[in-house]
Image: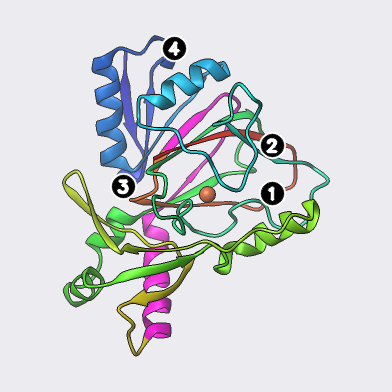
Amino acid sequence: MIRIIPNKNNIGAEIDTDLQKLSKENFKIIINALNKYGMIFFRRQNLSSKHYVEFAKNFGKLADYPRLKGLNKKYPQITVVQRKESDKGPSFGEQFHTDSIYTKKPPRFTMLLSKLVPKKGKANTEFCSQYHAFKNLTEPMKRKLSSLKGVYSSEGPISITTKERVKEKGKKIKELKSTHKIIRKISSNYAIYSSPGHLVGFQPKIKNEVDLKKKLFKHQIKKKFQHSLEWEKNQLAIWDNRSMLHQATPFKGNRIMHRITIL
Ligand SMILES: [Fe+2]
């Protein structure tokens, strides 16, 4: 049994199925839904690390996340994203971004499996559809952005959260930089692929860089392109970094997420 329940305005969708009993046909339905909606999530998936990694491998090669340590020796691809009640300062990823855009080959997909969550609605992840953002651009802006690449840095505006972690762990992290085309086609739709948390410039260089950056940010994160995902325990979400921005919402409480990224 498999059932797709799209969110409002098709910004993400819930899929009702049992991931431990997944057929090839149903996986095709899942990948098509991911391409169409940008983010999909599944409730009540009490997966072991073995099952979680096996499911993730259906989507492609699993990435080594350069900045976080793996769960253990057996499952180095699972990274633990944890926040404790006593933690101060912003949590990991508290600004709209796409993951690791400052690397040459950023992960296409990111997966989170919730192991421990605060009360429902208290620690949502917000998504912002860049399919909708592209569709709502004016024609001159579509042309302008199609001719540009974005320059992205790990030291971009979002890096405050990284700096907090460095302060805690005392480990110095080298800056990573990369460039990518801003407009991308994913299956049959176009999306804006740019990360407000990491964008530091354009290629080729343009005169009104600051203005364009501001205009692009403002447009990309309009409320009408957004969906706020509530978490419950044992919920799995996967999103396409090429068509969805995401951000963590500030919260106080204990949360443990197991994260896998896929190239
Ligand atoms: Fe992220």
Q: Residues within 10 Å of mark 2 (few under 14, many from 20)?
A: some
Check whether the beta carbons of the residues at disc 1 and disc 2 lie within 8 A of each other: yes
Tell me residue 156's x, y (percent): 54, 68
Residue interval drawn in magenta: 209-238
Q: Looking at the rendered structure, which numbered label has been put on residue 255?
A: 2
Look at the numbered disc 1 and give the secondary structure of its residue. Answer: loop
232 relative to 135 in the view: left or right: right
Identity, as a three-letter code, of the amino acid under mark 4: Gln
Front-most of residues 172 and 148: 172
Q: Looking at the rendered structure, which numbered label has been put on residue 251?
A: 1
Residue 118 appears in the figure: no
Front-most of residues 214 and 252: 214
Q: CA distance from mark 1 to mark 2?
A: 10 Å
Look at the numbered disc 3 and give the secondary structure of its residue. Answer: helix
Tell me residue 137's x, y (percent): 25, 68
Tell me residue 130's x, y (percent): 33, 56
Q: Nearer the viewer, mark 2 or mark 3?
A: 2
